C-alpha cells in the first residue's frame, strides 16, 4: 500500500463505516477518506441482518433512541434515492409496513396499540375477517392484525450500494485488518494494519462487534459484546406476503424481487461462536410457519449467523472520544443498525466535521469514559 496521509480513516467496512464515508464525501467532496476493513467478514452484522426498518415494533418507550430511529426511518426513502444515484446499485426498499398478528404478540397487543396511539404512529387494526380476505396466505387462526407504517430493505444490497458509493465518491477502500494504533496520551497518529501503517488527521472506530478489542488496544474499556443471531432464507414467491411480520420471538422479512423470505432470529450471548445449528433453524421455520404456513415446506436457500454489536446499556455509542482529540466512535448499533444508518451517517458526519449542534448525551462515548 502506498504511504499516504488521510483526513479521515474509518475502521470498519459495514453499513456504518461506509455510510459515514458516503455522507462525509457528499458534504465535503475534497476530503481524503479511507475505509479500512475486511469486506467479506463472514460474521459482519451488515450482511447478516434481516433489513427490518422497524422503530415502532422494536421500541416501547418514547426516549431519545426511539426519536433517533423514527427520524432515521423518515430519512430512508430520500437516502436510498440519493444512494442509488451515486452507487448505480438498485436497493429494494419497501415502505408497505409491518404486521403483528394477535397470535404472535398476544399479551403485548394492548401495550403496542396504546403506544402507537400515544405516539401518533400511523397504524390500523384489521379484524380477523378482514385479514382472511386481505392476507389469504396467513394461518386461519392468526386473529386480528395490527398494521404499522414502517419499512423493509435488502440490507446486502444496501451494503453493496454503500460500498460502491463511497468508492465512486473517491474514498480509498483498504482491505486490511487493524491490529493497533500509534498514539500518545491525547492523539492517534496512525493505524497499524497487516497492509501497512495508515496515517490520518482523524479516526473513526466503526468496527461493530469487534470495537471492544480495538478500544482495548487504545487503553480504554468499551463494555460491549456480540449477540449472535441465527437466521435463514426460504424460497417463497413475493406475492405470498407484502408485509414484514413481527412476533416477539419470530419475524418474517420478505426480501422481494425473487430473493425469498428471511426468517429470524435467535439472540445468543455466546461470544464469537459462529456455529449454525440445524435444529435451531428448523425451530425458527416451524414457528414462522404457524403464522405463514407455506414456509413449512419451502426450500431452504441458506442459513447463517451474525453478530450484533451490543453495548452494556444497549444504546449506540456515537460521537467524539473523551480521551483522544482526533478519535470518533460509531458502534453498538445492536438490533437496529440498518434502521439507524441514514440518521447515524448525518449525525456522525456533523460530529466529525464540527457541525453538530445537539449532542445526544445518551449516545455519547463520554458515558463510558471512552
Ligand atoms: C442476525 C441479525 C439480524 C439483524 N437484523 C436487523 C434488522 O432487521 N434491522 C436492523 O436495523 N438491524 C438489524 N441487525 C443489526 C445490524 O445488522 C447491525 O446493527 C449493523 O449492521 C452494524 O453495522 P456495523 O457496520 O457497525 O457492523 P458490521 O456490519 O459487523 O461491520 C463491522 C466491520 O468492522 C470490520 N472490522 C472489525 N474489526 C476490524 C479490525 N480490527 N480492522 C479492520 N476492520 C475491522 C469488519 O470487517 C466489518 O467490515 C441485525 C443483526 C444481526 C446479526
Image (spheres, helix red, strand yellow):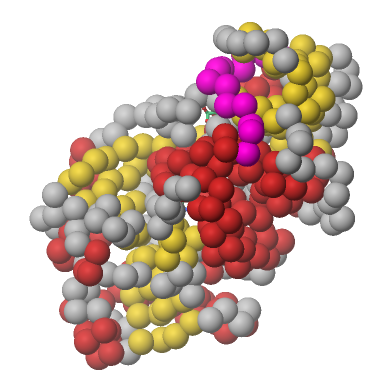
Residue 110 in percent (x, y) is at: 47, 80
Q: Residue at x 64, y 32 (%)?
A: 171
| Quarter of the rendering occupied by the N terminus | top right
Would residue 231 appear left or right of 84 to someone viewing this image? left
Which of the two residues, 14 or 118, is positioned nearer the viewer here? Answer: 14
Question: Does the rendering let one see residue 336?
Answer: no
Residue 73 location (% of width, % of height): 57, 64
Q: Work out whether residue 175 can be spotted.
A: yes
Q: Nearer the viewer, residue 17 or 166?
A: 166
Residue 275 horizontal/vertical position (percent): 32, 29
* Identity of the residue drawn at 19% across and 62% down: 237
Q: Position of residue 43 (x, y in %)?
A: 42, 31
Q: Is residue 7 above or below residue 330?
A: above
Q: Is residue 327 magenta?
A: no
Is 164 drawn above or below residue 265 in the view shown? above
Could you tell me which residue is drawn at 36 percent across and 37 percent down? 305
Q: Please identify the quarter of the rendering in which residue 31 is found.
A: top right
The reply, left or right, for residue 256 in relation to residue 77 is left
Specify the quadrant that holds the C terminus: top right
Relative to residue 210, is residue 155 drawn left or right?
Answer: left
State the residue in front, 27 or 265. 27
Corner quadrant of residue 194: top right
Which residues fall within the magenta stretch? 169-181
What is the tally of numbered marks visible in this picture? 0
At 49% from the left and 82% from the top, the residue drawn is 123
Query: In the image, is residue 173 above or below residue 60?
Result: above
Amino acid at each position: 500500500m502506498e504511504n499516504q496521509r488521510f483526513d479521515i480513516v474509518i475502521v470498519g467496512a459495514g453499513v456504518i463505516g461506509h455510510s459515514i464515508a458516503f455522507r462525509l464525501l457528499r458534504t465535503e467532496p475534497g476530503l481524503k477518506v479511507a475505509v479500512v476493513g475486511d469486506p467479506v467478514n463472514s460474521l459482519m452484522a451488515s450482511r447478516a441482518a434481516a433489513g427490518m426498518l422497524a422503530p415502532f415494533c422494536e421500541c416501547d418507550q418514547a426516549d431519545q433512541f426511539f426519536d433517533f430511529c423514527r427520524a432515521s426511518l423518515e430519512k430512508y426513502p430520500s437516502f436510498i434515492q440519493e444512494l442509488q444515484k451515486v452507487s448505480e446499485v438498485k436497493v429494494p426498499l419497501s415502505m408497505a409496513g409491518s404486521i403483528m398478528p394477535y397470535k404472535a404478540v398476544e399479551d403485548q397487543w394492548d401495550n403496542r396499540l396504546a403506544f402507537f396511539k400515544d405516539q401518533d404512529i400511523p397504524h390500523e387494526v384489521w379484524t380477523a375477517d378482514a385479514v382472511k380476505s386481505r392476507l389469504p396466505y396467513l394461518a386461519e387462526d392468526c386473529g386480528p392484525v395490527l398494521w404499522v407504517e414502517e419499512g423493509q430493505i435488502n440490507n446486502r444490497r444496501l451494503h453493496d450500494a454503500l460500498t460502491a458509493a463511497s468508492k465512486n465518491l473517491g474514498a480509498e477502500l483498504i482491505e486490511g485488518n487493524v491490529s493497533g494504533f500509534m498514539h500518545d496520551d491525547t492523539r492517534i497518529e496512525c493505524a497499524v494494519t497487516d497492509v501497512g501503517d495508515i496515517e490520518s488527521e482523524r479516526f473513526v472506530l466503526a468496527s461493530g462487534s469487534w470495537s471492544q478489542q480495538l478500544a482495548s488496544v487504545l487503553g480504554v474499556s468499551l463494555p460491549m459484546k456480540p449477540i449472535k443471531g441465527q437466521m435463514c432464507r426460504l424460497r417463497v414467491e413475493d406475492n405470498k406476503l407484502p408485509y414484514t411480520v413481527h412476533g416477539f420471538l419470530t419475524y418474517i422479512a420478505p426480501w422481494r424481487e425473487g430473493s425469498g423470505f428471511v426468517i429470524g432470529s435467535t439472540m445468543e450471548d455466546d461470544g464469537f461462536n459462529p456455529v449454525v445449528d440445524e435444529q435451531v433453524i428448523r425451530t425458527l421455520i416451524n414457528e414462522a410457519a404457524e403464522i405463514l404456513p407455506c414456509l413449512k415446506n419451502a426450500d431452504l436457500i441458506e442459513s447463517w449467523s451474525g453478530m450484533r454489536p451490543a453495548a452494556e446499556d444497549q444504546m449506540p455509542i456515537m460521537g467524539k472520544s473523551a480521551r483522544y482529540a482526533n478519535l470518533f466512535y460509531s458502534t453498538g448499533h445492536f438490533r437496529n443498525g440498518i434502521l439507524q444508518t441514514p440518521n447515524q451517517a448525518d449525525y456522525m458526519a456533523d460530529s466529525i466535521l464540527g457541525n453538530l449542534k445537539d449532542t445526544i448525551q445518551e449516545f455519547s462515548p463520554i458515558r463510558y469514559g471512552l
